[in-house]
Amino acid sequence: MRLKVDLILANGTRAARAAKKSTTAIPIVFNLGEDPVSNGLVASFARPGGNLTGFVVGLYDEKALEVLKEALPLLRRVAYPAPAGPGAAQRFAPLHAAARALAVDVQGIPMQGPSDLDSFFAAARRAGADAVLVENIAWFRPYLERIGAASLKSRLLAIGYYRQFAEAGGFISYGPAPFENVPRLAAQIDKILKGAKPADLPIEQPTKFELVINLKTARALGLTIPPSLLARADQVID
């Protein structure tokens, strides 16, 4: 069936793949969390090629681990929820590489859905984890507040991706500033509708990152935050 639209906006890798499969002529602008090059959606960030371009929030697990290590200099073992599925090993490879460089052990604990939240934290404690890293995985987002609260209840320090995590009792959140993608996606769409080709528009990535520290949680768990990290925080919840 012929698509009678001027442009397709695809949110997520699955939607972008479906849009790409449906047309090679209509421009597609995507909003992704994962690498579109390794996923085969585009040729490169600088020159996407084809009919796709967009904004990539990106994966910053390794940077989050660095922040966690700075907050906890004696950190030795970190657990993370590891949803099963195609590409899971590749998805977590950068985190494991960063852990080796920081002399930290990371362990993925299988997690299929929100009903596994409590059992995940219990398993992390049994595994001897000092802390937990919650990645930027799409189905986690509606449950960030619940995960943050569960981390405090389990008395396991945790770092998550968005500020809602820290606001709900999680120890730290670190990730791209919220809503930065909106005006930049709008600018790309505007250029395309005025005649630019997606193939020639570089894929956009975040330039602003936000660090939020929940000092109340740190105190409740008997932790003193290094002053250098507090000084860098965009928000301190006290």
Image (tube, helix red, strand yellow):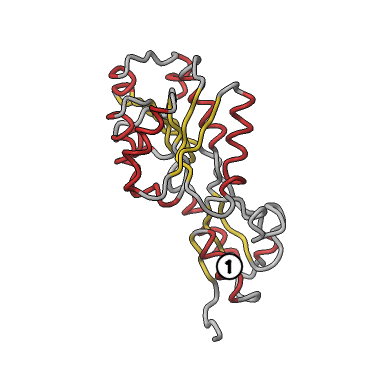
- Residue at the outermost bottom position: 1
- Residue at the outermost front position: 126
Q: Name the residue at 60% across, 75% down.
A: 26
* Amino acid residing under circle 1: Ile
Q: Determine which residue is flagged by label 1.
A: 28
Q: Position of residue 39 (x, y in %)?
A: 63, 56
Q: In this figure, what is the number of numbered marks?
A: 1
Left or right: residue 236 compared with residue 24: left
Left or right: residue 132 compared with residue 238: right
Q: Position of residue 129 (x, y in %)?
A: 44, 25
Q: The residue tagged with tag 1: helix, strand or loop?
A: strand
Q: Quadrant of the C terminus?
A: top left
Using the image, determine if residue 39 lies above or below residue 237. Answer: below
Quadrant hosting residue 195: bottom right
Q: Name the residue at 31% across, 23% down.
A: 217
Q: Name the residue at 55% across, 43% down.
A: 59
Using the image, determine if residue 73 lies above or below residue 190. Answer: above
Q: Position of residue 24 (x, y in %)?
A: 65, 74
Q: Quadrant of the N terminus?
A: bottom right
Q: In this view of the protein, which residue sits in the foreground, 30 or 59? A: 59
| CA neighbours of label 1 inside 10 A, class few (<14), some (14 to 19), many (20+) | many
Quadrant hosting residue 49: bottom right
Q: In this view of the protein, which residue sits in the foreground, 165 or 80? A: 80
Q: In this view of the protein, which residue sits in the foreground, 69 or 229? A: 69
